[in-house]
Image: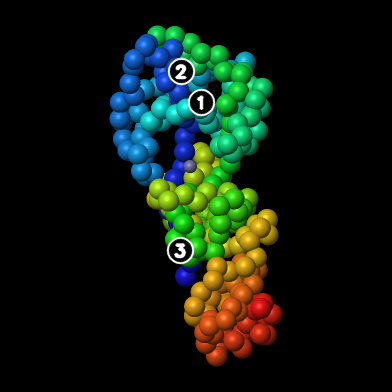
Amino acid sequence: MSILIPVGVSNRHMHLTREALDTLFGPGSELTVYRNLYQHGEFASEQFVEMVGPKGTIPKVRILGPLRTQMQVEVSRTDAYLLGIHPPVGIFDNLPQGETIVLNGPKGSLILTRDVMISRRHIHISPPEAEEIGVKDGDAVFVTPATIRGNPVESRICIMGNVLVRVKESFRMQLHIDTDEGNASGLVNGDQVYVVQSSLGRYDEMPGKKLITEGDVRQAILRKQKIRLKKGVIVTPAAADLGKERKVFIN
Ligand SMILES: [Zn+2]
């Protein structure tokens, strides 16, 4: 069985800089912890701001802490329609420009002309876990729910593709999706998914192992990976038969 990845559904939220917090809440103000998030050191604060777009307003958008060096406002596509903006699906390093919204805090307002995005669904994962699953930082994979809750007939089970893999020592393994994606798929906080296959073909080789079992070969077939037979690698007879038959091995 593949590693099971817990799901975290993110509601609209924002990450602020020191300057932005000063503007919205007054100089020297601090975020206070409402609850700690699953990722180490991250927390949902007790502070909210109002978000105003050309077409609509969202009254209470939560600020996540701690403060960052770059603004990052994350909304769902549904939120974007309500606000009247069209932010692209972004990743963290390359935040989109061109959408204007206003943030209203208790002490001041801020006009943003960039840094608004719809988050690309992604997996946070540590290096050893990534190696176990056979994924690398920057990969895009398919995931699917490990279990179905409730009546299977009512299930909206789906396979999600183009899930970005983000590998970092400090990460706790978790799939991050937004409320639109959660609502569409029926996934809620604490559900589990697993990686079924690389989606963009960016990994095609299983990480090196000393012992290759039949289970490894089956995983490789499922993910359309090859297994490199380096010197000293032991392959069980069943794995050898299956691997040869399915042309999984490379030298
Ligand atoms: Zn995340």
In this rendering, position of residue 42 left or right of residue 137: left
Between the C-alphas of marks 1 and 3, the distance is 33 Å
Determine the secondary structure under disc 1: loop
The structure residue drawn at horizontal position 66% and vertical position 22%, both measured from the top left corner, is 98
Which residue type does callout 1 highlight?
Met
Mark 3 vs ligand 1: CB below 8 Å = no
Of callouts 2 and 3, the N-terminal one: 3
Please report contact status of discs 1 and 2: CB closer than 8 Å, yes or no.
Answer: yes
Where's residue 217, x and y in %? Answer: 57, 77
Which residue type does callout 3 highlight?
Ile
Query: Vertically, is 146 above or below 119?
Result: below
Between the C-alphas of marks 1 and 2, the distance is 8 Å
**Res 20 label:** 2
The structure residue drawn at horizontal position 59% and vertical position 50%, both measured from the top left corner, is 138
Which residue type does callout 2 highlight?
Ala
The number of callouts visible is 3
- Front disc: 1 or 3: 1
**Res 3 label:** 3
Residue under pointer 1: 71
